Structures are given as structure tokens and as C-alpha cells.
Image (cartoon, helix red, strand yellow):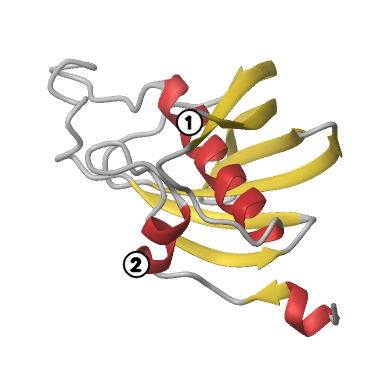
Amino acid sequence: MSDTAASATSMDIHEILDHLPHRYPFVLIDRVLSIDLGKEITALKNVSVNEPYFPGHFPYHPVMPGVLIIEAMAQAAAILSFKTASKKPSDDSVYYFAGIDKARFKKPVLPGDQIILNVKIDRILNGIWKYTGVATVDGTVVAEASMMCILKTI
């Protein structure tokens, strides 16, 4: 595969939904900015005050839950994995978290922020995919983690 064929400049929400099994209200990727198959993906999440978790987290000081920032990184990783493997989600398979290590939350994410998610494949071994993810807002790291995922037939 040539370098040009291995890279895509972006994916809109329609193509994202074609490569993720998630649906509203759990789709946490709004756009893919770039993807280098087998290597890395850069995606974004627009954080709106209308997110369903803000009324309870927290009513007078809305903060995006850190676990959802990690989930957004995992969704970016899933898109990268499906595209790299030339597969799409189906009714007979599911993409599971297998592990999360070194998760760190550096700064709160607030309504109006735009999270840039960068996820890199560290390795693929026996169907287990390992990644490193970094989330930034305005160039500042807000979260980072190492993740492990597996595609399972159900």
C-alpha cells in the first residue's frame, strides 16, 4: 500500500458512524482530522453544554468525566483499528476494552472546549491492540492513557 493510500485526510460523522458500533448518546467522536493506517489517528470531540452527563457532573460546575475522555480515545482507537484491518463493525462482533494503564487527568474539560484526540498503535499481537492516547485542549494535555483493546466475535 502506498503512503498516499495509507493516509486519509479526514472522516465526517457519516463515515465515523460507519466505522463505530456506538450511537447517540455515546458517540464521542465528531470528526477525524487525519488517519495514518496502522499507525495513528487524530480526531476531535466538541464538548457542548448540552451533553447528557453535565446536569449531574456537576450541576454548578460542569466538568466532562475523565472516563468519557478515555472512552473518546478508545473510540478513536476503534476507528483506527477497523480502518487498518479493512473491517466495519457488525452484529456479530464487538470491540472491547481489555485494559487501561497509566491514565492521567491533567486538567478539567469544560463545556465549549474542543478535545483533540491523538491515538497511536504501539503494537498488535494475537488480536490484542495496544495504543497510547493523548487528549489536548488548546494545545494543553488534559488526559493521557495506555489502552488495550480486542475485537471479539459474539
Question: Do the numbered discs 1 and 2 sit on residues whose CB atoms are within 8 Å?
Answer: no
Across and down, in percent, residue 140 comes to: 59, 42
| Side of 122 where 55 appears, left or right | left
Quarter residue 148 falls in:
top right
Disc 2 residue type (three-letter): His
Gap in angstroms between the C-alphas marked 1 and 2:
19 Å
Foreground of the two, 135 or 38 = 38
Q: Counting residues from the N terminus, which is met first, the one under dot 1 or under dot 2?
A: 2
Across and down, in percent, residue 147 comes to: 68, 27
Q: Which residue in the protein does label 2 denote?
A: 14
Up the image or down, 42 lies above or below 141; here it is below
> What SS does tag 1 mark?
helix
> What SS does tag 2 mark?
helix
Foreground of the two, 20 or 52 = 20
- Identify the residue at horizontal 20%, vertical 36% (top origin): 51
Is residue 140 shown to the viewer in this render? no
Q: Which residue in the protein does label 1 denote?
A: 71
Quarter residue 149 falls in:
top right
- Identify the residue at horizontal 74%, vertical 63% (top origin): 37
Question: Pointer 1: residues within 10 angstroms few (<14), some, or many (20+)?
Answer: some
Question: Pointer 2: residues within 10 angstroms few (<14), some, or many (20+)?
Answer: few
